Amino acid sequence: MARTFRVGLIGYRFMGKAHSNAWRQAPRFFNLKANVELHTLCGRHAASVQAARAQLGWQNAATDWREVVESPLIDIVDIGAPNDLHAEIAIAAARNGKHVLCEKPLALNVKQAEAMLAAAQKAKVVHMVCHNYRRIPAIALARKMIGEGALGNIFHFHARYAQDWLVDPEFPINWRLQKETSGSGANGDINAHLIDLGRYLVGEFKEVCGLLNTFVAERPLADALAKGARKLGRVTVDDAALFIGRMENGVLANLEATRFAAGRKNHIEIEINGSKGSLYFDFEDMNRLKFFNGDDPKDRQGFRDILVTERGAQPYAGNWWPPGHIIGYEHTFVHTVADFINACAEGKPVQPTFEDGLKNQRVLAAVEESNQKGRWVKL
Amino acid sequence: MARTFRVGLIGYRFMGKAHSNAWRQAPRFFNLKANVELHTLCGRHAASVQAARAQLGWQNAATDWREVVESPLIDIVDIGAPNDLHAEIAIAAARNGKHVLCEKPLALNVKQAEAMLAAAQKAKVVHMVCHNYRRIPAIALARKMIGEGALGNIFHFHARYAQDWLVDPEFPINWRLQKETSGSGANGDINAHLIDLGRYLVGEFKEVCGLLNTFVAERPLADALAKGARKLGRVTVDDAALFIGRMENGVLANLEATRFAAGRKNHIEIEINGSKGSLYFDFEDMNRLKFFNGDDPKDRQGFRDILVTERGAQPYAGNWWPPGHIIGYEHTFVHTVADFINACAEGKPVQPTFEDGLKNQRVLAAVEESNQKGRWVKL
Amino acid sequence: MARTFRVGLIGYRFMGKAHSNAWRQAPRFFNLKANVELHTLCGRHAASVQAARAQLGWQNAATDWREVVESPLIDIVDIGAPNDLHAEIAIAAARNGKHVLCEKPLALNVKQAEAMLAAAQKAKVVHMVCHNYRRIPAIALARKMIGEGALGNIFHFHARYAQDWLVDPEFPINWRLQKETSGSGANGDINAHLIDLGRYLVGEFKEVCGLLNTFVAERPLADALAKGARKLGRVTVDDAALFIGRMENGVLANLEATRFAAGRKNHIEIEINGSKGSLYFDFEDMNRLKFFNGDDPKDRQGFRDILVTERGAQPYAGNWWPPGHIIGYEHTFVHTVADFINACAEGKPVQPTFEDGLKNQRVLAAVEESNQKGRWVKL
Amino acid sequence: MARTFRVGLIGYRFMGKAHSNAWRQAPRFFNLKANVELHTLCGRHAASVQAARAQLGWQNAATDWREVVESPLIDIVDIGAPNDLHAEIAIAAARNGKHVLCEKPLALNVKQAEAMLAAAQKAKVVHMVCHNYRRIPAIALARKMIGEGALGNIFHFHARYAQDWLVDPEFPINWRLQKETSGSGANGDINAHLIDLGRYLVGEFKEVCGLLNTFVAERPLADALAKGARKLGRVTVDDAALFIGRMENGVLANLEATRFAAGRKNHIEIEINGSKGSLYFDFEDMNRLKFFNGDDPKDRQGFRDILVTERGAQPYAGNWWPPGHIIGYEHTFVHTVADFINACAEGKPVQPTFEDGLKNQRVLAAVEESNQKGRWVKL
């Protein structure tokens, strides 16, 4: 009989909601190799976490993450807390023998990430960083196609992650806009996704030259606003992060992440060009992958608009609905959690591991260093 | 304290999976006016329904729908069984005082639909036909905009529902291809959706002239195939159904439903043209609504590509994820069930009612009659 | 040495401008089998036609079309005059041994069209109706692909021609809105194009059921407006024309033409579905053809977005610019005229002939009759 | 009475064909302030230039550009020759008092460009560099909208010019692939266009960090190929050029130009994000401009798809066809030439001048220097 993993989730806001859904839904749509119990939801504010517990479907609530990582009742620790807590929680969880799933970016900096990887490896637990976009069916298909050589030798990786939630200068400061809690701004929050997709689909970064910018230096403080006052605070992270670079395999990279692109909500645009073809993806149409096949007959070549919902033929699609019935954002977490549960059941690694998180962190750090020093930085 | 509704669902395949998900998810994402219990899942084959029960998250399984509709433990009956069972189950459920949610098309024919409406009205239960596409956020927004006069006087309702699952002549016969079980083919299955959207967004149909066609008259029988044999059976429903018509408000209607459009998976394309603007929708990009506003300055007019994921501003969007994080097919059922539960809690009607289902059935029947007689038919 | 054809063009407004450009440009971009001289431009108003002559590049101007068709100096008569003059001019031109290129619709009615064809055949001149859209590179490619079997057996021809220039109720009456001069409204003006494309790409129409409608029955008279007065006149043609039908090869047809689709400027949308694939075209993106190939590997099927600008591989593209450098509306006339000149040089027929124009006229008439009688009409 | 300018055009291949068309067509579609005569076409090979003369519509042919620039019969010199000849011809033409229109990039390097500007200024002739994309109607509209403040403060200029004609490693070396004749590769040929559009629409570049790359270092020599032999030569220019940078007004720039993007034919993608809205353009859909207006009502915001063919309301559109009837690549040259003729007639400057060409050259040089030195370069 299948064993049951009891999960403790730290964090109950945006990521908490998305992860809770994933833990609830994975067993409904996937034939998993183990059962899961949504055992404990943990957050700092007792009343809020109790309300979230009921709403999101957890058995217990806790306010101290140490209880969760130390509890003998917990098998898996899932970390959806602000970035400054990732390292401490993950290391403690690993030391207690828990399998760990951690939101991205893995840590505040390279040093933390190294310690996290070391702790997880030493404890021999399953460790995964939640780069959920790897498990968009279209991205998983892209990976498969590239692996099979559909693009030939790759020349370009060109990507842009554009949002617009900071265009309004009255948007208040939250933890994501403060270096102490988030480590960085657009760089660690969304550029990290592009870097991960680049590493997943194309290769390792070799050298980068980056540019960070903060367009709006001061914003209202949320705390003051809540009390009806208007007090400005300093934004200590980047609003936009862009870089050009070379990958180890000679691919030219161009990545740009911004929270200042009016009208772009969660626009993740990726283009990969190779000697035999090209791929294009936009997250706002996440069920589609565009593919140019240079081997098509000359008179009828063109980017194919692949609707990635084909049961049997395309990754993850068979677990949901018939072709043409699209899925959404949250499903990427369900796929991630499903694969993570299976890995825990089998005691095998599952990509992206903390090692991926660490490599990502190194690229983030190189972009930051390059920006500070005004020159190229090698990885 | 909120009361709890115990639900019995008849059917566990495609619609059973979608409805189960909706019952599970609605309380997680909506603040409902009542609680729900997934009490009993019902299907004909004991072993299959038991497996489905566990997979889909129900407490009990049953093999006889009569038990469900008669059980004092059940408050709501949800009908996801083949079309030929809708009437009998719905009428029995209503007579037993259950609120009834029924898949579309409401019935096999107008007569059945009339009896269903009468039974529900007599029993004073809440009754709803599951035209889930009304609750696509983009469609709900379209309805709101039209109601506010954004299009002015409407001239055209032009719609096409195109799938391709029957293009392969070896696709076997199932209940959807037999008149006894399904009532009709593309007409009742997918044209019914277009008709409902036309009625919801634009107005009532006045007269129609239709054309039904069966491109592949004989197909392998599934039963024989399962035994390794190949035996042909007769397809007794339409593969494609199209009609032109006039609505009561003078709008010209053009609707086409087909299962023979290679490459179109679940392509529901709707265009509505009015004196002040136009709307365009395609289900394969269901999070988007295109809006042409004739009042925009002349030098910068154009169809706006509205990504309908805006919290606060757009229907249902606030219950899910931040802007730009799209939702999928299954969410339309969650919205339907959420509104249905609230209606049950308040004892109020909720659109689309069985009366909508009946009116829809009358249009379906008129299209069929028109095709048989080769002339226009008034409603 | 190549002979030279001297051309007389009747009409100098919209079509006059487009045809003049075609006669001027064809020899610059095509290696023609004959030379052409833009000999005489003809129009009713002496001053206007003189101004147009200079602007559009003609040697002489005339105010009486009879002079042109009878002149021994003229070899080719090109008719861009209002529809009510087509028959008389074309018949006279043919009788005088001129090759004739005539704008669409060929005539006001079937009877005229029959007489035109008879006259042209009797005179053994080259005759062509200017359905210029046949020579959009994307459409020519579609024809080639269908001819090669890329779509297999065809099931559906679904087309919509949508404009919005009549949405404004103050748009004044011109010759296109009066039955005497134009024969019909959207039907003959734009539905005729869809019918021609259907015949060119798919097959002959067998039976139709149509619906014509005039949304705005009265409009300001242009003459009165010019004098600063506002006087209403009756619109005597249809604003929208739609029909469903069957083709001889069993294809289901659905055509809609309207001048009341806000935001649609010259939107000619065509979808053709077959057993092996589908094609989609939209004139507002006229350099593109979308192709779904059912033979592509299952995991990477999708509509290809073919940019039809590929030298060597695609029709007409090689005469213009490198791949990706698009052409526009006027080029379709250049292609038409180039092929017409070559046909004249070789004394061979060139499609679409007056016979095509006549067959088109018969479909237009059947749609009109069907609308009047409220029933299906066979061709 | 209007005066007549006699034109001498140097070069008769790709640009020669496009410019010839522009000189022929401008007077047909624009009411110009002067007449033009296509006086002399000049090229090195006597037979080829004679054939081109007849095909392209010029009165005379010449094989020595010095004759043209010195001829008293010539008023305007139009330079479409390879880049290494621009400076010498332009300076000689200016010294002879000719107005000069010169293809881009203006010169091989900054020094040449400075000399050209000085010569033109000293001679007080009208000088223009042919950055034809400024006069795409959609781009001209973008400029107007930005000038009116439709985007507010601008944050990002993100552009990519992607072609694929060098993906094939067997594509032979021509003058564009040799530094002596072309100055650079993708940088001067297509990055120059992006830089010009950035300067035209957004502002001046302040500092850049660039990356050039040659993916295929050796290619067959065309001369040898013509003789049936296969001999490899060295590619001495860049295949791809990308850079990030800051503009003087604080805008972050990201430009990428490549000839190695399979499936991208002449894909010029531009996105500009500001505090009030965003613009998006793609040359392969050159009749469209996408505009996000942050002032639209919250529930119906989205990128508007503006079809820039609206007579009266939109730049250049009124000279061609009715709305929805698109134009193509060559029309951008007609617009350029029309504005140039009018400037010559009035003796006024016309943008983009040689000064624009020079500033562009400085950015190209900075990108090159940055790539060589591996660090940021200030302008």
Image (tube, coloured by chain):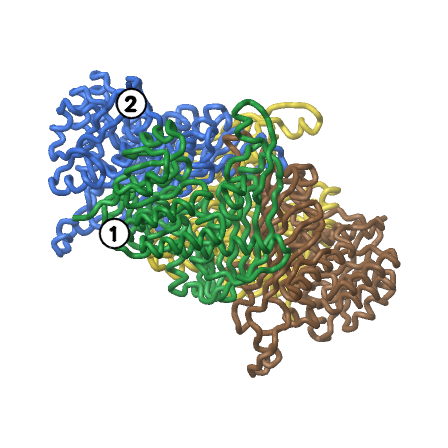
Chain colours: A yellow, B brown, C green, D blue
**Front-most of A76 and B294?**
B294
Instruction: Give the residue type at disc 2.
Output: Ala
Residue designated by label 2: D34
Q: Residue at x 59, y 83 (%)?
A: B227
**Front-most of D318 and B196?**
D318
Mark linked to residue B87: none
Task: Left or right? Give the position of B317 relative to D199.
Answer: right
Distance of mark 1 from mark 2, alpha carbons?
37 Å
**Neighbourhood count class around disc 2 (C-alpha, 10 Å): few under 14, some 14–19, many 20 upward:** some
**Front-most of B211 and A49?**
B211
- The picture places residue D338, in percent across and down from the top left corner, at 32, 28
Dividing the picture into quadrants, the one containing residue B77 is: bottom right
Q: Residue at x 79, y 70 (%)?
A: B65
Q: Are marks 1 and 2 in contact (CB under 8 Å)?
A: no
Instruction: Give the residue type at disc 1.
Output: Ala
Q: Secondary structure at mark 1?
A: helix
**Front-most of D315 and A353?**
D315
- The picture places residue B53, in percent across and down from the top left corner, at 72, 67
